[in-house]
Amino acid sequence: MGEAETAYRRAADAGHTGAKNNLGILLGEAGGMDEAEDFFRQAADAGHTDAMRNLVILLDQTGRADEAEIFLRRANDGVAGAKCLCGLATCTTSRRPHA
């Protein structure tokens, strides 16, 4: 485990949603998609808009477009959802998670 992962885990354990999102990105890039999804979901459930977007990307990339669409519609219920929806065009073209 590298220094960044250790720091993100410590902050995530303390409830920092940005750290959960960043840890999800780090883990996903290392191939730990299941654990990345868990951290994206935790942060997204807490209202972190980039995590919402990253979760939609991950779900789509893993062949779960229907689940991604359901989550995206759920995220559309507020201002956070608007940001998530605005990022959808980027999601479908870049497929790169955002911090």
Image (spheres, grey):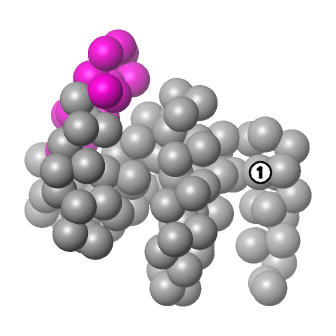
Answer few, some or many: residues within 10 Å of disc 1's Cα (few below 14, many 20 plus, some between 14 and 19): many
Counting from the top left corner in percent of width and height, residue 28 is at 49, 74
For label 1, the SS is helix
Residue 78 is one of the magenta-drawn residues: yes
Q: Residue beneath label 1, please?
A: 12
Question: Which quarter of the figure has residue 17?
Answer: top right
Range of residues picked out in magenta: 74-88
* Residue kind at label 1, given as amino acid type: Ala
**Quarter of the figure with the N terminus:** bottom right
Counting from the top left corner in percent of width and height, residue 95 is at 24, 66
The residue positioned 79% from the left and 84% from the top of the image is 2
Q: Is residue 84 above or below residue 32?
A: above
The residue positioned 44% from the left and 35% from the top of the image is 49
Counting from the top left corner in percent of width and height, residue 52 is at 41, 42
Q: Is residue 28 above or below residue 15?
A: below
Counting from the top left corner in percent of width and height, residue 72 is at 26, 36
The residue positioned 52% from the left and 47% from the top of the image is 41
Question: Which quarter of the figure has residue 46?
Answer: top right
Question: Which quarter of the figure has residue 63?
Answer: bottom left
Q: Is residue 76 above or below residue 37?
A: above
The residue positioned 39% from the left and 54% from the top of the image is 54
